[in-house]
Amino acid sequence: MKNIILYLYLGLLPLIGFSQESNIIEVTGQVVDQDSKEPLPGTSVYIKGSVTGTVSDVNGDFVLRTKLRFPFTVVFSSIGFQPQEVEVQRIGSRLNIALVTQTMLGKEVVISASRMEESQLRSPVAIEKLDIRAIRETPAPSFYDALENVKGVQMTTSSLTFKVSNTRGFNIPNNFRFMQLVDGVDMQAATLGVPLGNAIGPTELDIASVEITPGAASALYGMNAINGMANLITKSPFLYQGLSLYQKTGVNHVDGKDHSPSLLTETAVRYARAFKDKWAFKVNASYMRGTDWRANSATDQNPNNLNTANPAFPALAGDNNPASDAWNRYGDENNNAVTISGVQYGGKSQSFLVRRTGYWERDLVSPTVDNLKFDAALHYRLNEKAELSYGYRVGRMDGVFQRGNKIQLDNVVVQNHRLELKGDDFFVRSYVSIENTGDSYNVKPLADNLQISSSGTNSAWGAIYKSALQAELDHDADLATAMQRARLAADKGRVEPGTAAFNALKNTITEINNWDHGAVIPGAPATGGAWLSQRSRLYHTDAQWDSKDRIRFANLLLGVDARVYEVIPDGNNFVDFSRPLHARTLPGGDNVYYKKFGAFGQLTRAFFGEKLKLYGSLRLDYNPEFDPKLNPRVAAVYTLAEHHNFRASFQNGFRFPSLFEALSYVNNGNVRRVGGLAYINEGLGYLDNSYTLASVNAFNAAVNQDVTDGLTAEQAARNNRSLLAKTDLAATEPERINSFEVGYRSVLLNNSLVIDADAYVNEYAGFLGQVEVAVPLSGEVGTDAGVLDMLAANRARQTRYRVYTNAKNNYRNYGSSLGLTYNFFSRFTLAGNVNYNNIRANAGQDIFVTGFNTPKWAANLSFGNREVLNNLGFNLVWRWQDAFLWESPLANGKVPAYHTVDAQATLKVPSLNATVKVGGANIFNNRYIQYAAGPTIGALYYAAVTFDGLLAR
């Protein structure tokens, strides 16, 4: 393997000298490729320890201006080449730099692990990085898709426009526990409660690198980083100048099973320019349009063997189940269960549980998605040590994502403004994010209100069903057939997908911001809607100072931050809690504020000639709704024999409830989802006067059996009252994690093999989730009246709540991962990783299902060569994950194991500054899902062309 060769020729011309501007030194030179001797345009040239820098022009020449005193160090870096540092000591030198192609591994520098620059090899915690070259060489359709191949990362794809990553367990599609940052700005949409990194984040042309920190990072980054974080870093307009263009055209749904084959197009443009290394700006824009992956599974999560169906009647199993609840059908959930009692069958009076017919997701959401993104930034270098910048980012998106239910996103607009002052050892950053959900709607209340508005309330529908069922049984129809014919009779008048009546009613419902059940009657006020109208603002300021070499015995890092959420009440999802109960759901009122403040300090000390490095940090977070929380972290890195780096860390972290977990107040399908703060419960009783839904279901199943045996409903209720379990919930508290991690990273075999291994144990206390409860209206829990209210026939005498609360049990999960990267003959690279995650079972059942939602085993393997022939490279990635159980409020069930193969070939055209990339994701079209009720993902084939660095000076 070749070493980097650096040529420094002295004395030819005095081209390092004083310009006509007083005290300004100009450092000039040229950068070339050591192998080909060709100039290297676009090489980053900057002075170490300052914000001063520039880029080389099309001839590889550069001019670097500075007021710094000699000596200083100039750093040269270019994509695919080994970075080099040169110390400049005097006037009268010209720097002629020859860089060699990067073939050595383990030289990456990361920031996210400790909030300061350090070698990835000596990071105190596990951290993974995708640099520009890795992003360009990935066969994934976008750099965001490429995160799925990173060691330890689990991706959840809800939509082409909506992807959420997670690490180390407890995965959900709207992940509150995994933070996404773009240039330090949190991408979490406040009221939607979901990270939108791929929807409003950087374009393919502007991304410089992505750093993934698996595991708890809250000791340094605060709330929402309890499971890990992704830090997306964009290109500086000083260092990456010129015009860049990107065009991708692809095709998905190639098998025609969920949709006819469809085109996907994405266009992006970036332009950046610097003026005398003082001012610089950049502008990015992109537009993507395609046909979304479709969720179309009929998996029944309420099979006939459960007590919420009809286990006493085997004839109603399978496709004959009248109480089925399909993954991707809506309107057939538990709130739409109807008890059909008093039916004469088999010589007895029988009771049956049936559910409304519902509508399939494919009929309720649009298959067409698009995503428009724009951002711009203006940078000004105040001096050699400080740079001021303003950035604006906006994204408009469509798509589907899952919260408690599926949400059709339509014209969602999220904006942020960022102002930042930064130097080599500090930054002060403020930003505001503005969210508007546009024309979005909730699929569940849409289905419910379509049914109610066209074929009656549940009780009215059930009465027709019962009459028709009895008539069919009296004419000797078998039970399954009678059930099917009774459903047809009850559904008479129901609007059918594809008809004008269906479309008109759907449009009416999706324009109403009130999810309560009601009939949409022509000429009368509409009372049942599905519109998701949420608006919020997030205000955030943070600052950090690094002591660098100012303190002799250690490095000190200090930081503070403050955040305020401002929610505009819509009367449906978020309300003004200062209003009386009867007026809460009226639109408007005073805006709702949710606040958080934090500060941290970190000490780092090296011992034994830098072989041992110790880290200690302490963070204090305060939310006015809770007591202050301390988050400590201690870590150590030890380097043995120069190549072997061992690390260990322990940290405690807290996560404050998100906005939705703390403050929501939405009625959805006659089940009100409520935040867990104590004052929301006032006058409602769901914390202290309720039964768990699971016990209510068990109670009614036993009552139905006793009624079949001849008891009255009241007698059966009294006999089975012991099955009802009082909830006894406490007000929501922050979720806590204790995390212990060990790891090893090494570069061996003459810097051609990287080994990276880690293992962790996490313990969660106060895990946050949802439990559904029933509050009796006629009496207190435990009284006769309260028990009778729990009868299925008395659904109108109970109020259902889905409450965000803390689990009773502690949960311990654990796992490990191993990653290998090997560079060998003629620039070939073989890399792979294997990941294991598991959870320890608890002896007692909790009040809700926590949903570990993570496969035990997952693996990735890649093989490629960036230049197997002149300017031609390729890459192949095989990915596999084990089957696992998915549990959530929307859907439960097994997610099958799957494996996919991605492939790409890249041709560089240097004369045009162009790259042509042809490839595909899941090229063998192995259809799979990533979570229960999620979309089915198939093959996507694409061709993309990129022009980079045009019009560069």
Image (tube, helix red, strand yellow):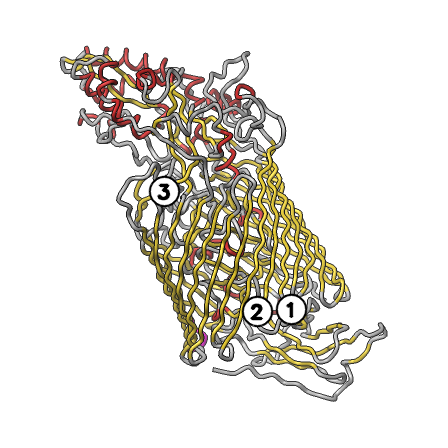
Q: Residue 283: percent from the left, percent from the top?
A: 67, 53
Q: Give, as a single range, the part of the protein colored magenta.
A: 825-829
Q: Amino acid at mark 3?
A: Thr
- Spot occupied by residue 596 in the image (x, y as percentages of width and height): 57, 44
Q: Are marks 2 and 1 in contact (CB under 8 Å)?
A: yes
The residue that disc 2 covers is 79
Proximity of marks 3 and 1: CB atoms separated by less than 8 Å: no
Of labels 3 and 1, earlier in sequence is 1
Q: Secondary structure at mark 3?
A: loop
First in residue order: circle 2 vs circle 1: 1
Whole-percent x, y for residue 564 in the image: 61, 42
What residue is shown at x 69% (from left), y 70% (from top)? Answer: 57
Q: Determine which residue is flagged by label 1.
A: 42
The quarter holding residue 321 reads top left
Do we see residue 415 in this rendering? no
Q: Is residue 236 magenta?
A: no
Query: Which of the two discs, 2 and 3, sits closer to the camera?
Result: 3
Image height check: is 768 above or below 670?
below
* Residue 826 in magenta stretch: yes
Locate residue 117 relative to residue 275 in the image: left or right.
Answer: left
Alpha carbon separation for disc pair 2 and 3: 44 Å
Q: Residues within 10 Å of mark 1 (few under 14, many from 20)?
A: many
Q: Is residue 576 visible?
A: yes
Residue found at x 38% / y 36%: 889
Residue at which label 3 appears: 850
Residue type at mark 1 is Gly
Residue at the limit of the structure toward the front, as seen here: 627
Query: What residue is drawn where x is 54% and y is 76%?
Result: 101
Answer whether labels 2 and 3 touch (C-beta < 8 Å).
Answer: no
**771 over 597 or under it: above or below:** above
Q: Specify the principal SS of the magenta part.
A: helix
The disc placed on residue 342 is none
